[in-house]
């Protein structure tokens, strides 16, 4: 390729040192690490190159000026892997810092708990035998010495969150946790000063340790998912081809374009910026912006918008607006503002906290009052009351939901579903109505050969192999059918018309019907496009149309069996929507729906009491996605990182929608079970505490026991097997077990 | 029980050492790539 690449936009410079981070695809083994790192390190000027196998990211550093970032990318590509740089501001530094902070807090709590336990067990066994008061006091003071600084540091995540909630006049789970920890520590110090037998330092620190375990795992699971999503976004990134002053093509990221630049848009590519056509003529697919699937003819002087897909002709554009100033960028910003006002869904855990905190605190207060009335000293009554607070173990309650969430996020990730919002799981579980968009959601975004059954297999294969050499989007649809991915040698493409090659000494042609001299009958093609093939005397006419996702019919049937109401809202023309609805058996559908109407219809459904899951892609669905109770989008949607959906699913199948719903329901059931377990535990433990029988030993055992129980229950979810819906030879192309980007790469390479 | 006078400080010191070692490892990025670490054993670079 004679095109140069300009990746300077992605390079970070500090002093005399430049670095870049690349998302790499296709890395699968130890050999890959060695190969990539050694080749990149061999480049002159490169200081370090490290491939992070977990996140599939390559970090390269070199002395400024020694080499060009593009060289690094090319080296990786020559080694056989796809690579694309991240823009520096896309790197989620914030998440990495939070993860480290949580781990440090966990470490501090863990080490403190272990060392305090050392002393506590000595005291407990000594209490049963012959420990002297002075030794016990010494051990208690040592425990205090360890516990107080450790809790001050390790409790930060909870104290800050509780303070935040209280400042805004609400309460969440962290408020009772913070109160419990502080009171336990305070009471223990007072008791130690009074030479008492029992001190609860170990309970307080163990509580922090268990809760931090839950938090850290939850955060780590989410972060892992977000890193993979970031990789996918980088690898799918649109590039622009800028024409420099000399007329050479330079590949640049869309954000580097400036108004007045001239860019070239090749056939089949996404337009990178808003602009006016300077040269060339083509058909433009605006569906991502308007929802209209019929292409629009453009020629010199016409306006074209970022995000739309170019048809068969190459266009030269003069950029009018780029980046956030494009139409697509502005709509995105409007949406960002609109969704900020969205009603806040109260998470299950927070709802429980609303009852938990007052009930527990009231119980403790009543206990203290009761004992004092009964004649016990104020000091002893308060001790018992605080013991009640400690034993009510927010441990199990605060672990109940996060434990299930961690397992669920991994399960969803394994099915190719990425969650954008934390409370998506709970909202997915409550769904009773599913609204589908048609184009790109129920149907595959790229066209497929619709009449392949009518064409001789050998002819089909020959046509498909020839199609591999063509850039035309219709040819790409034919190329998908090729089982041999080796393009034919000597293929010659005439842009806008077709491609020719010599096969077995006879010329083969693939292109428009006129190009191939194939007669076209006036038969009804259901809005499909035609591409013809001629090899000697054998001819074939391919109808390219958007087809339903391979398992759409089965998934829709399954959703209906589950009792969900189904509906299609599409901006496309009525005949197209009617055909799809008939094939899927969905009675409730509407065509020609504008974006604002979609939002209104969904709002009405919500007002009628339905919980709506909206599945859609494209900007014209974005507002609807935001207004539904919960939403999902396929990965081909407008922009992965800015998708307004709560969850994004990979692959060509529709099954992830059904999977997400069932996994979410199982998760919700497990959350409820965990909460029930926690409540039952409390019902048993609280009377024991009120009666004054709780000692630190009992508190420690109870806390550990309930936490383990709740975690084991959450792990039970992992045992559920996902149904492997592989039928009709359709390979499970979208099962990213640990290599999401790798699978997408295979699809991309296969085109 | 006089032995406690030096056993306790030693125990605490050991505990603190363990904590600092963990935090250092964390800050040094030792935990950033667990899967990669297990695979790098297999490479022949240092031989």
Image (spheres, rainbow, N blue to C red):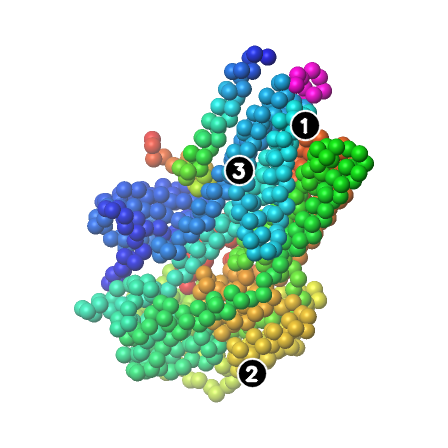
Q: Earlier in the sequence, mark 2 or mark 1?
A: 1
Asked whether residue B15 appears in the rendered view, the answer is yes
Asked whether residue A509 appears in the rendered view, the answer is no
Q: Earlier in the sequence, mark 3 or mark 2?
A: 3
C-alpha gap between disc 2 and disc 1: 76 Å
Report the magenta residues as a range.
A125-133
C-alpha gap between disc 3 and disc 2: 64 Å
Residue at the spot of label 2: A574
Q: How many C-alpha atoms fall within 10 Å of the one at disc 3: few (<14), some, or many (≥20)?
A: few
Q: Is A526 on the left or on the right of A609, as rendered?
A: left
Q: How many C-alpha atoms fall within 10 Å of the one at disc 1: few (<14), some, or many (≥20)?
A: many
Q: Is A361 on the left or on the right of A735, as rendered?
A: right
What residue is shown at x 51% (from left), y 26% (from top)?
B15
Q: Is A649 on the left or on the right of B37, as rendered?
A: right
Chain that bears disc 3: A
What residue is shown at x 61% (from left), y 35% (from top)?
A186
Residue at the spot of label 3: A152
Residue A182's spot in the image, x, y percent?
60, 39
Circle count: 3
Name the residue furthest right: A374
The relative height of residue A329 versus residue A8 in the rendered view (above or below) is below
Chain that bears disc 1: A
Closest to the observer: A465 or A78? A78
């Amino acid at each position: 390729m004679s095109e140069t690449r300009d990746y300077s936009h992605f390079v970070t410079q500090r002093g005399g040192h430049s670095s870049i981070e690349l998302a790499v695809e296709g890395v699968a083994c130890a050999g890959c690490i060695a190969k990539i790192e050694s080749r990149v390190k061999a480049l002159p000027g490169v200081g370090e190159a490290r491939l992070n196998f977990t996140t599939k990211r390559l970090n390269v550093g070199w002395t400024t000026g020694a080499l060009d970032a593009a060289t690094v990318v090319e080296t990786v590509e020559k080694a056989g892997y796809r690579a694309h740089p991240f823009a520096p501001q896309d790197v989620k530094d914030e998440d990495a810092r939070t993860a480290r902070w949580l781990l440090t807090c966990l470490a501090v709590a863990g080490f403190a708990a272990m060392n305090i336990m050392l002393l506590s067990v000595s005291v407990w066994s000594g209490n049963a035998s012959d420990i002297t008061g002075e030794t016990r006091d010494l051990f208690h003071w040592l425990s205090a010495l360890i516990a107080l600084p450790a809790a001050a540091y390790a409790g930060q995540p909870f104290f800050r969150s509780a303070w935040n909630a209280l400042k805004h006049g609400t309460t969440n789970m962290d408020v009772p946790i913070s109160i419990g920890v502080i009171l336990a520590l305070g009471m223990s110090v007072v008791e130690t000063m009074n030479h008492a037998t029992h001190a609860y330092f170990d309970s307080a620190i163990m509580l922090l340790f268990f809760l931090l375990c839950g938090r850290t795992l939850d955060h780590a699971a989410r972060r892992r998912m977000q890193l993979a999503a970031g990789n996918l976004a980088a690898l799918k990134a649109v590039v622009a081809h800028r024409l420099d002053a000399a007329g050479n093509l330079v590949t640049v990221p869309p954000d580097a374009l400036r108004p007045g630049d001239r860019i070239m848009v090749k056939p089949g590519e996404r337009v990178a910026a808003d602009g006016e056509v300077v040269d060339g003529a083509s058909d433009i697919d605006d569906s991502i912006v308007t929802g209209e699937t019929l292409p629009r003819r453009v020629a010199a002087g016409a306006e074209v918008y970022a995000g739309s897909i170019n048809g068969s002709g190459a266009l030269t554009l003069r950029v009018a607006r780029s980046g956030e100033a494009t139409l697509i960028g502005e709509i995105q910003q409007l949406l960002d503002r609109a969704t900020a006002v969205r009603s806040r869904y109260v998470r299950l855990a927070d709802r429980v906290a609303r009852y938990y905190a007052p009930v527990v605190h009231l119980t403790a207060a009543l206990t203290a009052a009761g004992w004092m009335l009964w004649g016990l000293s104020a000091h002893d009554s308060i001790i018992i009351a605080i013991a009640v607070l400690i034993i009510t173990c927010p441990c199990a309650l605060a672990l109940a939901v996060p434990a299930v969430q961690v397992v669920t996020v991994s399960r969803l990730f394994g099915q190719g579903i990425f969650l954008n919002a934390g409370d998506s799981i709970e909202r997915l579980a409550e769904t009773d109505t599913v609204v589908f968009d048609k184009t790109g959601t129920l149907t595959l975004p790229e066209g497929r050969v619709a009449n392949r059954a009518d064409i001789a297999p050998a002819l089909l294969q020959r046509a498909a192999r020839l199609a591999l050499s063509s850039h035309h989007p219709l040819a790409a649809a034919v190329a998908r059918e090729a089982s041999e991915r080796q393009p034919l040698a000597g293929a010659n493409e005439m842009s806008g018309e077709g491609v020719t090659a010599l096969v077995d000494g006879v010329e083969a042609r693939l292109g428009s019907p006129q190009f191939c001299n194939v007669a076209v009958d006036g038969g009804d093609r259901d809005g499909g496009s035609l591409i013809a093939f001629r090899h000697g005397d054998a001819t074939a006419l391919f109808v390219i149309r958007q087809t339903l996702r391979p398992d759409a019919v089965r998934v829709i049937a399954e959703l209906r069996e589950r009792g969900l109401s189904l509906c299609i809202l599409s901006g496309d023309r009525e005949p197209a929507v009617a055909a799809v609805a008939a094939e899927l058996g969905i009675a409730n559908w509407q065509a020609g729906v504008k974006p604002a109407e979609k939002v209104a219809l969904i709002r009405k459904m919500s007002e009628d009491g339905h919980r709506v899951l909206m599945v859609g892609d494209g900007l014209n669905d974005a507002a609807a996605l935001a207004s539904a109770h919960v939403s999902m989008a396929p990965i081909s949607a407008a922009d992965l990182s800015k998708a307004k959906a709560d969850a994004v699913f990979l692959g060509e199948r529709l099954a992830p929608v059904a999977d997400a719903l069932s996994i979410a329901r199982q998760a919700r059931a497990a959350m409820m079970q965990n909460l029930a377990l926690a409540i039952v535990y409390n019902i048993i433990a609280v009377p024991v505490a009120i009666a004054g029988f709780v000692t630190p030993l009992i508190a420690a055992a109870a806390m550990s026991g309930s936490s383990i129980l709740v975690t084991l229950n959450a792990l039970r979810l992992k045992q559920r097997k996902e149904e492997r819906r592989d039928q009709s030879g359709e390979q499970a192309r979208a099962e990213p077990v640990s290599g999401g980007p790798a699978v997408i790469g295979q699809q991309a390479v296969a085109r | 029980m006089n032995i406690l006078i030096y056993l306790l400080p030693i125990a605490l010191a050991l505990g603190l050492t363990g904590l600092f070692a963990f935090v250092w490892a964390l800050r040094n990025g030792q935990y950033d790539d667990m899967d990669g670490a297990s695979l790098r054993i297999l490479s022949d670079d240092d031989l």
